[in-house]
Image (cartoon, rainbow, N blue to C red):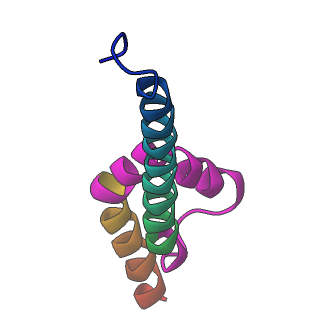
């Protein structure tokens, strides 16, 4: 296709641009998901929270493995007082 038509370069370029835009959109959506879940729980603060949002796979790992346990511990401490 590249050797037959000169427009194949244009198609490759625009396909690459579309792929990069979709990749950026997926990244933003995943970061937003982690940020919205982290916002309703007072477990993390400051830089650690921001790092877990920007590096969203670590944030998703934290949410899945540790967030429920840490939230329960906070509420147990509050109810014991």
Q: Which residues are magenta?
A: 38-64
Q: Of 38 and 55, which appears nearest the observer?
A: 55
On the image, the x and y values in percent for residue 52 come to: 54, 50
On the image, the x and y values in percent for residue 77 come to: 45, 78
Seen in the image, is 50 located left or right of residue 30?
right
Magenta-drawn stretch, dominant element (helix, strand or loop)? helix
Q: Residue at x 41, y 89 (%)?
A: 79
Q: Residue at x 45, y 62 (%)?
A: 29
Q: Residue at x 31, y 67 (%)?
A: 68
On the image, the x and y values in percent for residue 2 come to: 36, 15
Q: Of 43 and 54, which appears nearest the observer?
A: 54
- In the picture as drawn, the residue positioned furthest to the right comes out as 46
Which corner quadrant holds the N terminus? top left
Q: Residue at x 71, y 59 (%)?
A: 46
Seen in the image, is 19 located left or right of residue 21?
left
On the image, the x and y values in percent for residue 5 come to: 38, 21
């Amino acid at each position: 296709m590249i050797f037959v038509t000169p427009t194949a370069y244009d198609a490759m370029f625009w396909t690459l641009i579309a792929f990069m835009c979709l990749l950026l959109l997926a990244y933003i959506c995943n970061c937003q998901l982690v940020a919205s879940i982290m916002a309703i729980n007072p477990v993390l603060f400051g830089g650690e929270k921001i790092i877990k949002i920007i590096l969203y796979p670590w944030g998703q790992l934290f949410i899945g493995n540790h967030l429920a346990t840490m939230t329960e511990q906070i509420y147990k401490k509050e109810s014991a007082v």
